[in-house]
Image (cartoon, rainbow, N blue to C red):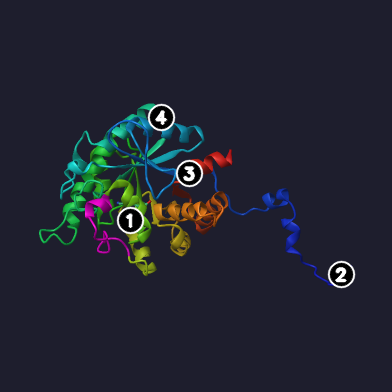
Amino acid sequence: MSKLEIPLRLRRLRRTASVRALVQQTRVGVDDLIYPLFVREGGGAAEPVASMPGVGRHSLEGLVAEARAAHELGIRAIAIFPVTPATKKDPRGREALNPKCLVLRAVRAVKKALPDLIVITDIALDPYTSHGHDGVLHANGRDVDNDATVVLLAKMAVLQAEAGADWVAPSDMMDGRVRAIRAALDAAEHKGVAILSYAAKFASAYYGPFREAVGSQQAAGKTYLDKRTYQLNPANPREAWREAALDAHEGADILMVKPAGAYLDILHALRQRTDMPLAAYQVSGEYAQIHAAAQLGWLDLAATRDEALLAIKRAGADLILTYFAKDVARALR
Ligand code: PBG
C-alpha cells in the first residue's frame, strides 16, 4: 500500500476506452475530409504514383468510380487535379482555357454521376505550362507575370463553374486573384460557387510527390521548380496573416493553410485571428513520409496517419485535404 498522498490523479480519466472517449476533446470525422484525386487521359487501371503508395492517376471512368467509392464511405468533397499530356503543354498554359480540357470533362462526369458530391477544382496554370510554373512568364522568361496570369485564372474559374464545380480553389498565390475570380464568377452568374483560397501557401519541398504525379516537375526538367517569387517564405508567419486578411477581404469563402503538418503554428494562430472556415492541406510529401516510414517498418501506418490528422484538427482546421481521406473514412466505419 502506497503512502503517497496524490489527491488529483489525471489518470482516472484515462482508465478505459469508454472514459477516454467521454473526455476526448478533438475528433476527426468523415465530414472534415476532402479527398484529392488525380485524373489523366486514356483508359485502363489507375497509373500508380511511385512516391504516393495507394494514390493513382485515374482514367475518367476510374475517377468517377473512385469518387463514388469515397462518397459511399461518407466523404462529401473531392478536389480534382488533372495530368496534362506533355504534348498539350505550352509556355502560356493554353490548354487551361480549352473548353474540352480534361479537368472540365472530369467535373462534368463526376457531377453527372454523383450530383451531391462537392467537386472542387484547382485554379493555377502549373498542370498546363511547359515550364511547370503556376502562371505565364514575363518576356524575360524568369518570373511569373502576376496580372497577365490573374486574367487567365479568372477565365479558368468561369469555365470550371460552368462545368459544374461547386468550389474553385486558387492555388497559384498571385496577388489580386481572389478578387478577380469572385468578380468573374459573379458576372457570369455563378454567385453560388465558393472560393476555397490557398491563402497561406508556403514554398515547400513537401510538394515533391505531387509535382511528380501531375508532371509539373518533369516539365521543369532537372532544375528544382522554384516558386519562391510567389509562394510564401516558410520563415514568415506575419506575411501569412497578411495573405489571409487580403484573401478574406477580396471575397474568399474559406481560407487554407498548406502544407499542414509543418505549419500547425500558422493554422493555430490563424484560428485565433479569423472567424472564417479554415482548411488545411496535408500535402503529398506528408503522405509520402508516413508511407515511407511504414514501408520500412519504422512507423505504424494507421496510428501515425490518425495522429497527424488529429493534430491538424486540434490546431484549428475545420476541413482537411488528405490523400488518406478514403482510408480514414473506411477506418471510421
Ligand atoms: C500547384 C499545386 C501544388 C499542390 C497543389 N496545387 C504544388 C505546387 O505548388 O507546386 C501541392 C499539393 C501536394 O503536394 O499534395 N498549384
Relative depth, front residue between 167 and 48: 48
| Residue 200: image location, x then y, percent | 36, 59
Mark nearer the viewer, 1 or 2:
2
Check residue 162 for magenta coloring. no
Tell me the distance, in whole angstroms, between the alpha carbons under discs 3 and 2. 48 Å
Mark nearer the viewer, 1 or 4:
4
Amino acid type for the residue under numbered disc 1: Asp
Tell me the distance, in whole angstroms, between the alpha carbons under discs 1 and 2. 60 Å
Lateral position of residue 230 relative to residue 210, left or right:
left
Magenta residues? 216-232
Q: What secondary structure is marked by label 2?
A: loop
Q: Which residue is mark 4?
A: 114
Q: Which residue is mark 1?
A: 247
Tell me the distance, in whole angstroms, between the alpha carbons under discs 3 and 4. 18 Å
Mark nearer the viewer, 4 or 2:
2
Q: Earlier in the sequence, mark 3 or mark 2?
A: 2
Res. 279 visible in picture: no
Mark nearer the viewer, 3 or 4:
3
| Residue 64: image location, x then y, percent | 38, 31
Tell me the distance, in whole angstroms, between the alpha carbons under discs 1 and 4. 30 Å
Q: Which residue is mark 2?
A: 2
Give above or below for 225 relative to 180. below
Q: Earlier in the sequence, mark 1 or mark 2?
A: 2
The residue at the far top in this view is: 113
Mark nearer the viewer, 3 or 1:
3
Check residue 226 for magenta coloring. yes
The residue at the far left in this view is: 139
The residue at the far front in this view is: 296
Tell me the distance, in whole angstroms, between the alpha carbons under discs 3 and 1. 27 Å
| Residue 52: image location, x then y, percent | 41, 48
- Rendered-image quadrant of the N terminus: bottom right
